[in-house]
Image (cartoon, grey):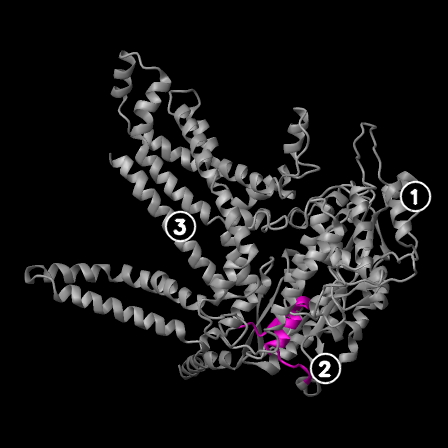
Amino acid sequence: MNRNYFYFLFILLVISAAPLIAQNKITLRLVDWASANEIEIDKQTIEAFHRCHPDIEVLYEPNPGPQYEEKILTGLVAGEPPDVFLLDSKLIPTFTNKNILLDLNQYIGELGIDTSQWFSAVTNIARRDSFLFAFPKGFSSLAVYFNKKLFDDAGVPYPSPIWNWNDYQIIAEKLTIDINDDGETDQYGTAISNHYYSWIPWLWSAGGDVVDPSGKYSSGYLNSKTSIDVFQFLIDLRLKSKVAPDIGTWVQEEKTGAISALFANGKIAMMIDGHWRMPRYLKFISENKLEIGVAPFPFHPSGRKVNVLYESGWCVPVLSKHKREAVTLAAFMAGEEACRIRAEARLEIPANIKAAKLAVDSDATGMTKVFLDELPFSRQPWGSIIERFSEVEWTLQDAVDEALINKKQLSDALSIYSVKIDKQLTQIRSHEGSGFKPIREHSEILYFLIVVCFLIIFLSTILYSFSDKSDKRKTGTAILFLTPSIFHLTVFLITPIIFSFYLSVHQWDIVVPQKPFVGFQNYVEMFNDRTFWNALTNTLLYSINVPFGMAISLFIANMLHKRLRWLGFLRTIYFLPSVTSFVAIALVWMWIYHPSFGIANYFLNMLGIQSLSWLNSTSTAMISIIIFNIWLNLGYQMVIFLAGLQGIPDELYDASRVDGASGMKQFWKITFPLLMPTTFFILVTSLIGSFQVFTTIYIMTSGGPVGSTDVIVYHIYHAAWEQLRMGYASAIAWILFVIIMVATWIQFKFLNREIEN
């Protein structure tokens, strides 16, 4: 009995002590952009860390996708950043200039971290003077992937380690083949991407650059003779020599992954890419479906070669609550054991020297060694030096697209865009050096919320006080029942609307602590900005789809309203796009619109019509978007029209037939007038939706090519989350709000009167 009693006390003591033991454990949040394959490897690495540090729990939060930077910034702005996160080299300037990152040097001695374990060239990318802001995880330069089978079939020797640009072009010409002699190229020698990251080594190798050595201006560099010659060489590979397929603009190539897909399918013999592409092909290699090799980046004919070094590393924000433990985790994730585990995925070259050599020795193909041998030729990218350089990259890519896609004079395009980049760099520099302060330290939004709540309570009190005595109880009950809805509207609608106007008259940038009052300066800048007027024009042009879409929907609804066979099936088919995943549909349509391999051009050619560039031309991109959206919204509008048609009494049609009215006369005299309320509803909602179009543009074109599909809402997104200018974005949002209000008022003023009459 006594023994059982002591057992009971012991168990009770353990249970009550468990929370105290758990409280002694430190939990760290770790965030990266790992894909599905990498997640399992990261989990193995975290388990290895936990075995060494059982008192530290790691909450792993992978964030794959292109919005990784925005997600990190959101956490920082909220004052709740992860304790350790993966830092892409292009994010280094923004985060270091704003004092967001912890200097890791202050913990290196205390924790016994040996920085010589990493390649110095890789480590130095995250250094600023004597400060170190990230422990390097991995890196990659660029090299040339080639299809060995295509080389062997054509009897072309594999590229030499010392090959140059001329050799590259000659080999590409030999491997560009019309296999079935139908006059159409079936196999291309290479592919030319207009992504900045892929063509900058060509420019550097020739002795050119996109900005001056200090990174302050572009004029005289981007439009120099050297730059013009290099870009002309690359463009001629596609347009003149025709050894590269037309894969569209840089946006389309990025979203469809056309180059890597064509290479995997044996349609392209060579492509330039980083080590990060390796895992995609390892599966095909293991299944004997693909045999590839890797050649070093070619030398310039002068004998010069400069490659680019892309790196990522683990960093710790200054807002971390457990800095010492976070640095310990970051060091482990970049250490030898973690790098060896990650090297198995072959995603990148480990930054740890021992792990990199082990990866080279264990790679029987020798491809990893080719990438590692490029390190002495590689230099730090501008993205790791100039803050917000991604914005400059997009402008650079648009400049090349002007010549590559729009066939404009290359020298003129580069001169125009170099001036534009000068302005971008000036605007970026104006925010350099300013610190960072979480949004929770900016209490203006709370003040606005308090004031709005007070006003609503005050107005409710007045309403209750001035009501008749007999109605006071009813008024009080009504206010009580409306309180939840009023609270929701106050917090999530009214206050944000008012606060957005406050933002619009301030220079409110997310990562800049000073947010001065600038009056209507944002509005003045907006009205003087050509890109805003371009976005507004494109939005108005896009709204043209509304009447066309409504007419087609009404026609189909009228057909389906008749007693046809398979009526239910046809209705389902037409409505299906409205309930299908939008992203999946958009990606399918992007391939339908592909200039070289899309089914749209296939049908045009069958009809004897010349192929169109669709999303890849400034003259057809918006039309392509309109066609897609008419098809997408067809089902929804059709169902609404069907509901309206079913409400029209059959007796009216019977009477009109007796009077000898034709089908067309019945439509204009009976159907259309009685459908006016339905038509008005669809018109108003569709027009508002057309002014707010975003997802289609975001998924399919990103506003390109060269701004030809940039619309107001995408322009707002770009200003807010890519340029981080919330004040300027709010000013644009208010102008859009006014436009929608005026357009809706006009419709209600004139069309609604006609309906009532």
The residue lying toward the viewer, choosing from 64 and 127, is 127
Q: Amino acid at mark 1?
A: Val
Mark in front: 3 vs 2: 3
Q: Which residue carries the number 3 mark?
A: 740
Region in magenta: 81-105
- Lower sequence index among marks 1 and 3: 1
Q: Which residue carries the number 2 mark?
A: 129
- Lower sequence index among marks 3 and 2: 2
Q: Residue 696, how many percent across, how many down?
A: 53, 46
Q: Is residue 83 magenta?
A: yes
Q: Secondary structure at mark 1?
A: loop
- Lower sequence index among marks 2 and 1: 2
The residue lying toward the viewer, choosing from 124 and 197, is 197
Q: Amino acid at mark 2?
A: Asp
Q: Residues within 10 Å of mark 3 (few under 14, many from 20)?
A: some
Give the spatial CA distance, label 1 vs label 3: 62 Å
Quadrant into which the C terminus falls:
top left
* Left or right relative to 17: residue 184: right
Mark in front: 2 vs 1: 2
Q: Is residue 365 visible?
A: no
